[in-house]
Image (tube, grey):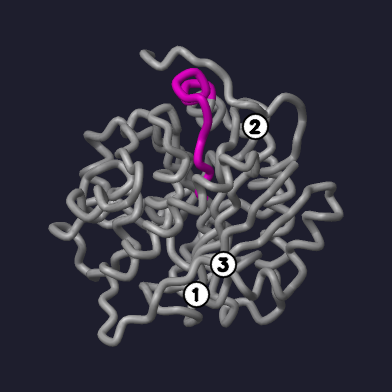
């Protein structure tokens, strides 16, 4: 498969700090060589924005998303699978925009829901609003500045593995059309997961696969300071990703929220290699499928 890795080495709009170190660390540890040995043709491109004299997190993050949307679109036009290595989950906005299809679903694998808004957040952490932005619940005016962005309907979203939710997020999900798969069911043989994926597969032509590394069980792999107890092992999650790939076209993949300072033995590096190998396997025809989008 032709793969284009898009490196976004920013955390909260600042380059090369905390989780912003993760993308380049993955490359330094040989990720490209690993994917190449698996038979993929891999190109790498780094997303850069001009350093502002007085940087503003929100402004910088939307600037990053505008550039990323254009680069994702270019990768797709060239027949490549965009694989985004990013410090923050908020880059999902640019990735989804770059795919440019109203028939794209989202599979959000994360120990957090990322469904806060400026009105509900108690931390002010912009990344905690990432999925809320993708589904059009907040930052609507700035989101229109990202080329080709259109909110993803919540019925086309599967949130899987989340176990550290704020009260406002729980209240939102109680009335949302988002399909929630709890962490205990994030296994390839789970009836709950199988039902969620089967329903999504007939509604979309492809999916954006969002992988926040703190979805993994921190007893095996700790990816960042936000890690929550529980979650799948790398082996369990790899099986889930293979199951997703067998059922639907994966249009783009993102690996986010990796801070190497929490991973002195590079366990997360090996996990990413395993998970990406699983996500971009070619078990058969992986082209977009025509679907019944009215269901």
Q: Residue at x 37, y 51 (%)?
A: 93
From the viewer's side, name the closer residue of 4 and 33. Answer: 4
The residue under label 2 is: 189
Q: Specify the farthest residue to the bottom.
A: 53
Across and down, in percent, residue 224 comes to: 51, 72
Quick one: label 1, few (<14), some, or many (20+) residues within 10 Å? many
The residue under label 1 is: 20
Q: Quarter of the image containing the C terminus?
A: top left
The residue under label 3 is: 46
Magenta segment: 198-210
Across and down, in percent, residue 290 comes to: 53, 16
Q: Residue at x 25, y 55 (%)?
A: 116
Q: Upstream in the sequence, badge 3 or badge 2? A: 3
Give the number of callouts.
3
Mark 1 vs mark 3: in front: 3
Circle 1/circle 2 CB separation < 8 Å: no
Residue 217 picture quarter: bottom right
Q: Specify the label residue 220 is tagged with.
A: none
Question: Magenta includes 202?
Answer: yes
Across and down, in percent, residue 251 comes to: 56, 38
Mark 3 vs mark 2: in front: 3
Distance between the alpha carbons at the discs numbered 3 and 2: 37 Å
Distance between the alpha carbons at the discs numbered 1 and 2: 34 Å
Distance between the alpha carbons at the discs numbered 1 and 3: 12 Å
């Amino acid at each position: 498969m032709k793969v284009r890795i898009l490196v976004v080495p920013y955390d909260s709009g600042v380059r090369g700090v905390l989780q912003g170190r993760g993308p380049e660390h993955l490359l330094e540890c040989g990720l490209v060589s690993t994917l190449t040995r698996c038979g993929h043709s891999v190109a790498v491109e780094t997303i850069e924005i001009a350093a502002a004299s007085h940087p503003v997190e929100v402004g910088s993050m939307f600037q990053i998303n505008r550039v990323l949307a254009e680069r994702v679109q270019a990768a797709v036009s060239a027949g490549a699978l965009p694989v985004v290595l990013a410090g923050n989950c908020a880059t999902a906005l640019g990735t989804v925009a770059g795919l440019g299809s109203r028939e794209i679903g989202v599979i959000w694998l994360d120990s957090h829901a990322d469904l806060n808004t400026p009105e509900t957040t108690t931390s002010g952490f912009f990344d905690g609003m990432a999925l809320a932005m993708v589904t059009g619940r907040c930052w609507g005016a700035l989101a229109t500045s990202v080329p080709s962005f259109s909110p993803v309907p919540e019925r086309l979203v599967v949130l899987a593995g989340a176990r550290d939710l704020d009260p406002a997020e729980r209240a939102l999900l109680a009335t949302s059309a988002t399909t929630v798969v709890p962490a205990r069911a994030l296994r390839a043989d789970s009836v709950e997961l199988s039902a969620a994926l089967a329903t999504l597969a007939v509604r979309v032509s492809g999916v954006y696969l969002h992988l926040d590394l703190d979805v993994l069980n921190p007893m095996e792999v700790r990816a960042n300071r936000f890690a929550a107890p529980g979650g799948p092992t790398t082996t369990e999650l790899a099986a889930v990703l293979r199951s997703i790939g067998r059922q639907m076209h994966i249009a783009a993949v993102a690996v986010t929220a990796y801070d190497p300072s929490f991973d002195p033995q590079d366990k997360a590096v090996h996990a990413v290699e395993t998970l990406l190998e699983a996500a971009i396997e070619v078990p058969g025809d992986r082209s977009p499928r025509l679907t019944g989008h009215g269901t």
